[in-house]
Amino acid sequence: KDPVLVVLQLSGGNDFMNTVVPYGDPLYYDFRKTVGISEGDLLHIDGRYGLHPALGPIKEMYDASNVAIVAGVGYPEPDRSHFRSMDIWHTAEPTAVVEEGWLGRVIRELDPNKRNVCTGVSFGQGLPRAMYLGGVPAISVRNLESYGLLTKMSGERQRRALDVFTRMYTPEEIDEASMVLGHIGQTGVDALTGADMLKPVPGLYSSTVEYADDELSQSLMGIAQVHTAGLGTRVLYAELSGFDTHGAQMGTQTDLLGKVSRAVDDFFADLREHDAAEEVVMLVFTEFG
């Protein structure tokens, strides 16, 4: 089976030093007298590092050799701006401001002839910049159950509106010199094709895994549905926001990391149930690491 990449973005700048805690370094407690997590509360990895106590399911995956922690990932002369830092991670360009997302380039390499508009699918509000690349199709979905075009209409009224939409975006003749019109037309065609491909996906899916009701859990369930449907999707994206914690660090981060850990554990349990886990790798990242 083809390898599949799932990217999970923890937006807001998750505190990595309280996620993978370097408790074996005395400087950690010297400089974190207020927010430092006590050694006794940690889920110990070795004599130097331990995981946040909310990451129990992730620790179990780590113990089963299914998690890798890559420490110290960064770039020269780091920018402490949330916006610029995320901009850099999305484009993989630490010194220049560019529009092309690194996952957009991946999708182009995987499907250079644009044969599958669902090669890349993102769950959340809007397409992440990492997946953007002019002319490369990628689908953004908020909820699979309600995804589609003109979904608030029904019956004959919806049929007529969709017919107009289709004819508007697929004209019989087009001025080849008009790149703008061509791009808009292709975007409309891709939207129609993507809606048709994704519409039957929820009906093809069944699972004994009970996901939580939070947004991340539902996004990962949607990703599991798309992956197990066999649409040829190779790049999938999800996001959880709220990690800009500041004064509410201890309680807020515990709650958020608990959601991440539970959702990721449910997701891979779901894939294993469908014999669809071995080809999937998930990358988790945030603004500063």
Image: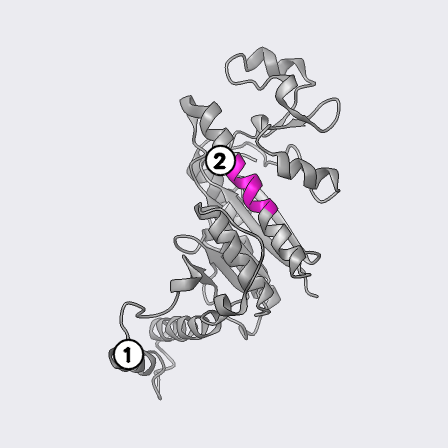
The residue to which callout 2 is attached is: 256
194, 217: nearer the viewer: 217
> For mark 1, what is the residue?
155
Image: magenta residue range: 258-265
In the image, what residue occupies the spot 49% across and 35% down?
256
Which secondary structure, mark 2? helix
Where residue 93 appears, as percent x and y from the top left, is 54, 46
Residue plotted at (62% across, 49% down): 282
Q: Is residue 176 visible?
A: yes
Q: On the image, which quarter does residue 44 sit in? A: top right
Q: Amino acid type of disc 1?
A: Gly
Q: Measuring 45% from the left and 52% from the top, which residue is drawn there?
A: 128
Residue furthest to the left in view is 157
Does 122 appear above or below 21?
below
Question: Position of 63 compared to 174: left or right?
Answer: right
Front tag of 1 and 2: 1
| Residue 3 rendering spot, x and y as whole percentages | 67, 60
Q: From the image, which quarter does the C terminus lie in?
A: top right
What is the chief secondary structure element of the magenta stretch? helix
The answer to if 260 sits in the magenta stretch is yes
- Residue 68 visible in the displayed image: no
Q: Position of residue 60 (x, y in %)?
A: 69, 38
